[in-house]
Amino acid sequence: MENNIIIKETILEKALKVHKNVPEFEDTNPSKEIFENRYQNAEKLIIVAYYQQKPIGYMIGYDKFRDNKENFYCWMAGVDFRYRRMGALKGLMKYQEDWAREKGYQNLRIKTRNNRREMLSFLVKNKFYFVSVEGQEKIENNRINLVKKLN
Protein backbone atom coordinates (compact mmCIF):
# COMPACT_ATOMS: atom_id res chain seq x y z
CA MET A 1 0.00 0.00 0.00
CA GLU A 2 1.12 3.55 -0.67
CA ASN A 3 3.09 5.25 2.11
CA ASN A 4 2.71 2.22 4.38
CA ILE A 5 -1.03 2.75 4.79
CA ILE A 6 -2.83 -0.29 6.14
CA ILE A 7 -6.57 -0.86 5.62
CA LYS A 8 -8.48 -2.95 8.16
CA GLU A 9 -12.07 -3.97 8.69
CA THR A 10 -13.11 -2.69 12.08
CA ILE A 11 -15.88 -1.53 14.39
CA LEU A 12 -17.87 1.66 14.06
CA GLU A 13 -16.28 3.40 17.05
CA LYS A 14 -12.88 3.45 15.33
CA ALA A 15 -14.37 5.02 12.20
CA LEU A 16 -16.16 7.65 14.28
CA LYS A 17 -12.84 8.74 15.82
CA VAL A 18 -11.59 9.63 12.33
CA HIS A 19 -14.91 11.28 11.39
CA LYS A 20 -14.21 14.05 13.93
CA ASN A 21 -11.07 15.09 12.02
CA VAL A 22 -12.65 15.40 8.57
CA PRO A 23 -13.24 19.12 7.87
CA GLU A 24 -16.12 18.45 5.47
CA PHE A 25 -18.01 16.88 8.36
CA GLU A 26 -17.19 19.46 11.05
CA ASP A 27 -20.81 20.64 11.15
CA THR A 28 -22.00 17.10 11.90
CA ASN A 29 -21.73 15.13 15.09
CA PRO A 30 -23.67 11.98 14.40
CA SER A 31 -24.20 9.51 17.17
CA LYS A 32 -23.28 5.86 16.94
CA GLU A 33 -27.01 5.10 16.78
CA ILE A 34 -27.51 7.26 13.67
CA PHE A 35 -24.85 5.25 11.88
CA GLU A 36 -26.14 1.89 13.12
CA ASN A 37 -29.73 2.71 12.15
CA ARG A 38 -28.60 3.53 8.62
CA TYR A 39 -27.15 0.09 7.88
CA GLN A 40 -29.31 -1.94 10.27
CA ASN A 41 -30.08 -5.44 8.97
CA ALA A 42 -27.96 -4.87 5.86
CA GLU A 43 -24.65 -6.34 4.77
CA LYS A 44 -22.06 -3.69 5.67
CA LEU A 45 -18.39 -2.90 5.53
CA ILE A 46 -16.58 -0.60 7.97
CA ILE A 47 -12.92 0.00 7.21
CA VAL A 48 -10.25 2.31 8.59
CA ALA A 49 -6.94 3.38 7.05
CA TYR A 50 -3.96 3.45 9.41
CA TYR A 51 -0.66 5.25 9.02
CA GLN A 52 1.99 4.38 11.60
CA GLN A 53 -0.77 2.66 13.58
CA LYS A 54 -2.83 5.88 13.75
CA PRO A 55 -6.35 5.86 12.24
CA ILE A 56 -6.37 8.50 9.47
CA GLY A 57 -9.30 7.62 7.20
CA TYR A 58 -12.48 5.60 7.12
CA MET A 59 -15.17 4.30 4.81
CA ILE A 60 -18.57 2.82 5.57
CA GLY A 61 -20.66 1.05 2.96
CA TYR A 62 -23.76 -1.09 3.06
CA ASP A 63 -26.39 -2.80 0.94
CA LYS A 64 -28.70 0.23 0.87
CA PHE A 65 -30.74 -0.77 -2.15
CA ARG A 66 -31.24 -4.46 -1.30
CA ASP A 67 -31.44 -5.17 -5.01
CA ASN A 68 -30.05 -8.69 -5.15
CA LYS A 69 -26.43 -7.52 -4.91
CA GLU A 70 -26.65 -5.25 -7.93
CA ASN A 71 -25.40 -2.20 -5.99
CA PHE A 72 -23.27 -1.68 -2.90
CA TYR A 73 -23.50 1.85 -1.49
CA CYS A 74 -20.46 3.75 -0.26
CA TRP A 75 -22.20 5.89 2.36
CA MET A 76 -19.51 7.72 4.32
CA ALA A 77 -15.84 8.27 3.59
CA GLY A 78 -13.30 10.72 4.86
CA VAL A 79 -9.63 11.27 5.54
CA ASP A 80 -8.16 13.32 8.38
CA PHE A 81 -7.08 16.59 6.75
CA ARG A 82 -3.54 16.23 8.18
CA TYR A 83 -2.99 13.01 6.22
CA ARG A 84 -4.45 13.75 2.81
CA ARG A 85 -2.67 13.02 -0.46
CA MET A 86 -0.97 9.97 1.03
CA GLY A 87 -3.17 7.41 -0.71
CA ALA A 88 -5.55 6.62 2.16
CA LEU A 89 -8.75 7.28 0.21
CA LYS A 90 -7.43 5.33 -2.76
CA GLY A 91 -6.60 2.40 -0.49
CA LEU A 92 -9.98 2.52 1.22
CA MET A 93 -11.82 2.61 -2.10
CA LYS A 94 -9.79 -0.26 -3.55
CA TYR A 95 -10.45 -2.36 -0.46
CA GLN A 96 -14.19 -1.64 -0.65
CA GLU A 97 -14.33 -2.37 -4.39
CA ASP A 98 -12.49 -5.68 -3.97
CA TRP A 99 -14.67 -6.64 -1.00
CA ALA A 100 -17.91 -5.79 -2.84
CA ARG A 101 -16.78 -7.66 -5.95
CA GLU A 102 -15.92 -10.74 -3.87
CA LYS A 103 -19.37 -10.57 -2.25
CA GLY A 104 -20.98 -10.61 -5.69
CA TYR A 105 -22.00 -6.96 -6.09
CA GLN A 106 -22.07 -5.62 -9.65
CA ASN A 107 -21.75 -1.87 -8.98
CA LEU A 108 -20.48 0.53 -6.39
CA ARG A 109 -22.68 3.61 -5.85
CA ILE A 110 -21.84 6.81 -4.05
CA LYS A 111 -23.40 10.23 -3.52
CA THR A 112 -21.47 13.42 -2.91
CA ARG A 113 -22.12 17.13 -3.02
CA ASN A 114 -21.24 19.59 -5.72
CA ASN A 115 -19.06 21.56 -3.29
CA ARG A 116 -16.92 18.52 -2.43
CA ARG A 117 -14.61 19.16 -5.37
CA GLU A 118 -11.74 16.95 -4.18
CA MET A 119 -14.07 13.98 -3.83
CA LEU A 120 -15.67 14.59 -7.23
CA SER A 121 -12.24 14.75 -8.85
CA PHE A 122 -11.16 11.57 -7.08
CA LEU A 123 -14.29 9.71 -8.19
CA VAL A 124 -13.97 10.74 -11.83
CA LYS A 125 -10.28 9.78 -11.88
CA ASN A 126 -11.26 6.39 -10.44
CA LYS A 127 -13.78 5.53 -13.16
CA PHE A 128 -17.03 6.52 -11.48
CA TYR A 129 -19.74 7.84 -13.79
CA PHE A 130 -22.35 10.49 -13.09
CA VAL A 131 -25.85 9.04 -12.90
CA SER A 132 -28.02 11.91 -11.67
CA VAL A 133 -28.09 15.19 -9.80
CA GLU A 134 -30.47 15.98 -6.95
CA GLY A 135 -31.02 19.72 -7.13
CA GLN A 136 -30.87 21.78 -3.93
CA GLU A 137 -31.68 25.41 -3.19
CA LYS A 138 -27.98 26.33 -3.46
CA ILE A 139 -26.24 24.81 -6.49
CA GLU A 140 -23.11 24.02 -4.48
CA ASN A 141 -25.22 21.72 -2.29
CA ASN A 142 -26.55 19.66 -5.22
CA ARG A 143 -26.17 15.94 -4.55
CA ILE A 144 -24.41 14.03 -7.30
CA ASN A 145 -25.03 10.29 -7.68
CA LEU A 146 -22.24 8.23 -9.24
CA VAL A 147 -21.69 4.58 -10.10
CA LYS A 148 -18.74 2.34 -10.90
CA LYS A 149 -19.08 -1.07 -12.51
CA LEU A 150 -17.18 -3.74 -10.60
CA ASN A 151 -17.02 -6.46 -13.25
Image (cartoon, helix red, strand yellow):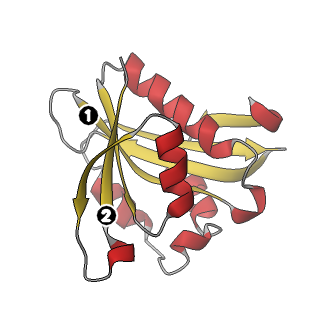
Quadrant location of the N terminus in the rendered image: top right
Could you say which is closer to the camera, residue 40 or residue 62? 62
Q: Earlier in the sequence, mark 1 or mark 2?
A: 1
The answer for how far apart the CA atoms under marks 1 and 2 are is 18 Å
Mark closer to the observer (1, 2): 2
SS assignment at label 2 = strand
Q: Check disc 2: other Cα within 10 Å, few if <14, some if 14-19, many if 20+.
A: some
Residue drawn 35% across the image and 20% down it: 103
Picture residue at 36% right of the left edge, 65% below the top: 33
Residue found 39% across the figure and 27% down from its top: 100
Compared across the picture, whether 67 is left or right of 59 comes to left
Residue 35: x percent and y percent?
Answer: 38, 60
The picture places residue 12, in percent across and down from the top left corner, at 50, 52
Q: Quadrant of residue 38?
A: bottom left
Give x and y (percent) for residue 93: 53, 37
Residue occupying the point 71% across, 51% down = 55
Please provide percent x and percent y for residue 111.
34, 54
Say left or right for 21 vs 116. Answer: right
- Mark 2 lies on residue: 143
The amino acid type, in three-letter code, at marker 1 is Asn
Figure quadrant of residue 140 = bottom left
- Element assignment for label 1: strand
Instruction: Name the residue tied to disc 1.
Output: 71
Horizontal side, residue 3 vs residue 11: left or right: right
Q: Are marks 1 and 2 in contact (CB under 8 Å)?
A: no
Query: Where 91 falls versus 142 (above or below)?
Result: above
Q: Is residue 132 above or below residue 43?
A: below
Q: Nearer the viewer, residue 105 or 31?
A: 105
Looking at the image, which is closer to me, 99 or 24? 24
